[in-house]
Image (spheres, grey):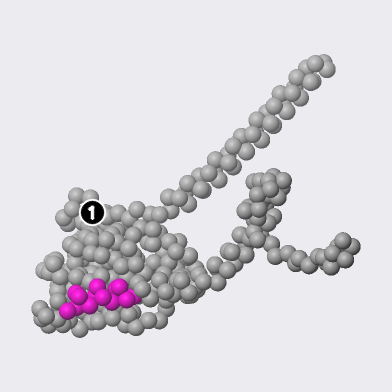
Amino acid sequence: MAASNSSKLFRVGRSILGSLSNNALGTSRSSSQFADMDFLSQQTRTFIQMRTNLKVVDNSGAKRVMCIQALKGKKGARLGDVIVASVKEAHVGGKVKKGDVHYAVVVRAAMPRGRCDGSEVKFDDNAVVLINKQGEPIGTRVFGPVPHELRKKKHLKILSLAEQIA
Amino acid sequence: MRLEKCWFCSSTVYPGHGIQFVRNDAKIFRFCRSKCHKNFKMKRNPRKVKWTKAYRRLHGKDMTQDSTFEFERKRNRPERYDRNLTENTLAAIKKIDKVRVDRESRHHAKRMKPKKAQLQREAARELEQSISMVKAPGALQRDPSLTLPIKVKVSKPEKVDNRMEE
């Protein structure tokens, strides 16, 4: 009787100890995980692909837009490329409504783009300007800085509307 | 082609090097290498980071005002190409650099001057205190070259009495 009691207690104690040690291991693992995440918090920015949410920086009426297709580029669109996008959020009474599908040109990308002199440029966010099939912008104003790369891609109208060319 | 200054450490960024970050308010930050870029991402203030030029100028370690700096100011008007002007400019750059380096070394020497006397005093003290660890005290008495010359006041002995006795 005594022996069985002691053995039960022993088993109970062991299980408690086991759970305690498991807890300790769990916490130490998560703390190291946090340390790893701090190290990896330097993000690697990538292409603009399907389902990418982008900001619209003209006065066409749309606010946010989701990329449906990156024309050109297997991995996705970069700074200066044209994409097909669906309007997810729009201003009330703008030229463009929610659910419309439009072409758009990427004017700001967080992913660094190499310039022909060897340096790299990157912006703070991902932004587009809506254009029509011919490449002319739908809106009449463009906000924020735009890159030089648009000149090579022949989006001269956007460059002329821009406040600042980076 | 333009030689820019790194925003963080103020060194020159040559073509083909570095990353340009354009913020949404159209301010451009140029970095010479990823060290500066990563420090910027960590939101460090260059005026508090010891190895940057901003810190050194702020704390008086390097020259702040000098007429040689006037030659390096940013000019936005392009000059018409003139071969003589180009040759003269290239020769002037060399001379101005030499002058600037000379002035900087003089500034450094002036900054370091009071240190020399302090070092001498410290060295004398250390010799006095710790020479016993290197040489035995007996050796010091036998070989007087190891100690610093000590000024001792010697009083003249009286010889008049001895002659009288004889």
Query: Eyeballing the image, is A34 above or below A166?
Result: above
Instruction: Work out whether residue A54 can be spotted.
Output: no
The chain holding disc 1 is A
Q: Which residue is pictured at 11% across the width and 80% down the height?
A: B84
**Residue A65 falls in image quadrant:** bottom left
* Residue B123 higher or lower than A16, as above or below: below
| Residue B53, placed above or below residue B80 | above
Residue for badge 1: A76
Residue A47: image location, x then y, percent = 27, 55
Residue A99 appears at what percent x and percent y? 27, 64
Res B105 → quadrant? bottom left
Left or right of B142 in this view: B81: left
For the view shown, which residue lies furthest in the front direction? B166
State whether residue B159 is above or below residue B63: above
- Horizontal side of residue B81 vs A25, given as left or right: left
Residues shaded magenta: B88-100
**Nearer-the-camera pick, A60 or B44:** B44
Q: Nearer the viewer, residue B2 or B147?
A: B147
Q: Quadrant of residue B66?
A: bottom left
Label 1 is placed on what type of residue? Gly
Left or right: residue B114 versus residue B134 is left
Q: Badge 1: few (under 14), some or many (20 or more) residues near its Cα, within 10 Å?
A: some
Task: Tell me if residue A4 is in the magenta stretch.
Answer: no
Please indicate, yes or no, whether residue A152 appears anywhere in the rendered image. yes
